[in-house]
Amino acid sequence: MTSAQTRSEHIFDATTAGFEEDVIKASLTTPVLVDLWAEWCGPCKSLGPILEKLAGEFNGAFRLAKIDVDAEQELAAMFGVRSIPTVILISGGQVVDGFAGALPEGQIREFLTKHGVQPGEAANDEDAEAATPETAEEAINRLQQAIAAEPERAELKLDLALALMRAGNVASAQSELDALPANLATDARAVRLRSQLELARALAGAPSLQELQARVQSSDTDWEARDLLGVRLLIEGEAAAGLDQFLDILKRQRDWNEGQAKKRLLAAFTTLDDAALVSQYRRKMASLVF
């Protein structure tokens, strides 16, 4: 296998201790390809160099996490690995897809492309310093032009839906999302966007934060107000406070509105970037549900 000294900056050894931070949380911004291998595995010796070559070539479009199943048996068990090599793609904090066995380079490229992972451009220091973040409106214009030039590239339509959501154009984002082909409709980014749209729609015509807080203070069992208060807090950046509202409903009136509190929690978990917070509240939800 490639030595640590010669490895690309986009390749690292994943461990049980650092898995949540280095893989799950990191995948919220950059997809992570997990390579489960062992020294004694013959096919691993042919697959490993291909994955490492692609990690360097894709230049940060994904990171490659190497897991030695003999050294990290807990991680191997967590993934339910039955044979190696096994490769798993994690994006948005969730397992997106995977494959077993030593596939040829062409098929691995197709696997990555299918999930919207495209080679990144090498950047020089001057370009990096001069670059400014693209606004949502600029992204929309760029993507609309790209789609007009290459309408067969469905992944651009997912990018457009995400940009529309960033711009606050909920209806258009929903329209683009609904029009995605089946293979992209289950992409981790599409799943996350769907949850964001669900939460955004819940606030259409909803009272202000202050009105909802007043209603909850006036009637501790005003579940509708508590539910909308949770959504508004979540959207306005007070994630923990919002999640607490849903947990309170789940604890005291689990079946309200066909179990909506649990649905809200699951949608929120998909949208949040804070892996530690999500893990904490998943455990709290589990203690109430099971």
Image: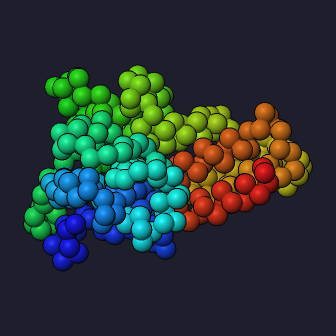
Q: Quadrant of residue 287?
A: bottom right
Is residue 208 something one can see in this rendering?
no
| Residue at screen point 42% across, 68% down | 70
Q: Give coordinates of residue 254: x percent, y percent.
A: 83, 44
Is residue 197 something one can see in this rendering?
yes
Q: Nearer the viewer, residue 225 or 271?
A: 271
Q: Quadrant of residue 247?
A: bottom right
Q: Give coordinates of residue 3: x percent, y percent.
A: 20, 73
Q: Quadrant of residue 158?
A: top left
| Residue at screen point 48% across, 33% down | 170
Q: Is residue 159 left or right of residue 229?
A: left
* Count of residue discs: 0
Q: How is the image coloured?
A: rainbow
Q: Nearer the viewer, residue 116 or 225?
A: 116
Image quarter hosting the N terminus: bottom left
Q: Is residue 266 above or below residue 154?
A: below
Q: Give coordinates of residue 87: x percent, y percent.
A: 35, 50
Q: Nearer the viewer, residue 1 or 88?
A: 1
| Residue at screen point 42% across, 72% down | 71
| Residue at screen point 49% across, 54% down | 79
Q: Give coordinates of residue 16: x percent, y percent.
A: 48, 70
Q: Is residue 8 above or below residue 189?
A: below
Q: Is residue 192 above or below residue 156?
A: below
